[in-house]
Image: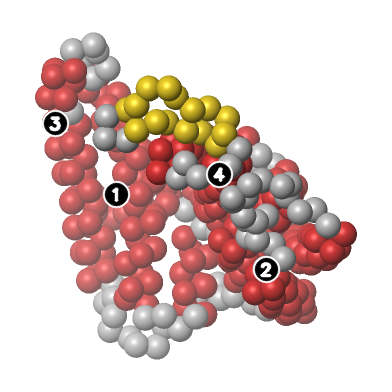
Amino acid sequence: MDLELNLRIEVKRMYKLNELTKNQSIGRSNVFIIFLFLLQLFINCMLFNHILFIVLDYVIILTIAGSNKFLRDLSIYLKMGIFFGIFVLIFNIILNPNGETKLVETTFQLPLYGNLTITLETVINSAISILSLISLIMVFGLMNKLINPDGLTKIFAKMRLPYSITFMIITSIRFFPLLIQDLKSITEVQKSRGFELEGRNFLVKIKNQIVIILPLLTNSLDRSIQMAEALEARGFGMNKKRTMHNPIKFRKTSYLSIIITIISVGFSIAIFVLGIATFDPYPKFNGFGLHLNSLIIFIIHLTLHLLNYYVIYMEGKLK
């Protein structure tokens, strides 16, 4: 009875994300076309470093978050991107002091380095890299908000991946939020018992982390054993032909979205190969190269993305 009760509690906690996703219009759409759309955004973030196309990524990301009312939830990913962006800026200034337009040059020499030189080209290149990095992190944030673990299982099944590998990946993803929740609960319990976890004494604080790590490790092992017993009791892996309780269903709008995605990805690759959306501020910054051709291509690309998102959004509305 205890095992069954614990499993019910774990399942209810793991499926909490499903309830949040179903309240969003796009969350009720075909999970496969949502995945393709976000993959398309990811490809754009990786391929392009032109300011116009970086702006395009942010327009799409903010449109998705705003229309589904979780703009505030993306702030954590924005903070994470800014945090890593600071390191990108520092490393670029130290390791890549190229460019002809000098902004700062020290008169003294640093040990093993020499004169510290900061150029306008390095700052602009760093800013573009930081914006691209933040957009990538926010795309992963959108995926976390819009695709629940069950949806990932269906996507991998549709891609004909081995179910044992799929199950291992999805189970790890599902248990990670539970691990964070356990960490918070254990920390609160140990604080109530008088352990100094946030005090000024650094050595004592490190020593008292053991009272958090050991219960957390014990809970994780206990949960994995319960999962293994439940899988064994239900004969996991005995039947090679698997079925889905709620399989992915394709409608006319789903096929339309797939066609638009293929066209958009092909258009992106063509733009990249032709070098239209690339930008290099070195050796001297002479503007971002905002020509009429670039603006026309940007408008076409933006239209394809917004049209695709509108199709996905309307599919969720119709369900």
Q: Are marks 2 and 3 in contact (CB under 8 Å)?
A: no
Q: Earlier in the sequence, mark 1 or mark 4?
A: 1
Q: Nearer the viewer, mark 1 or mark 2?
A: 2
Q: Which mark is residue 275?
A: 2
Q: Are marks 4 and 3 in contact (CB under 8 Å)?
A: no
* Crowd tier of the residue under label 4, counting other residues whose Cα lies within 10 Å: few below 14, some 14–19, many 20 or above: some
Q: CA distance from mark 1 to mark 4?
A: 61 Å
Quadrant in the picture for residue 161? bottom left
Vertical side of 299 occupied by 76: above or below? above
Callout 4: SS: loop
Q: Which mark is residue 6?
A: 1
Vertical side of 103 occupied by 316: above or below? below
Q: Earlier in the sequence, mark 1 or mark 3?
A: 1
Q: Nearer the viewer, mark 4 or mark 3?
A: 4
Name the side, left or right, on which 98 lies relative to 229.
right
| Residue 43 visible within the image | yes
Which residue is more in the foreground, 17 or 120?
A: 120
Q: Earlier in the sequence, mark 2 or mark 3?
A: 3
| Residue drawn at point x = 32 percent, y = 35 percent | 113
Q: CA distance from mark 4 to mark 3?
A: 50 Å
Q: Name the spot of residue 127 as percent of width and height, x first.
A: 58, 41
Residue kind at label 3, given as amino acid type = Ile
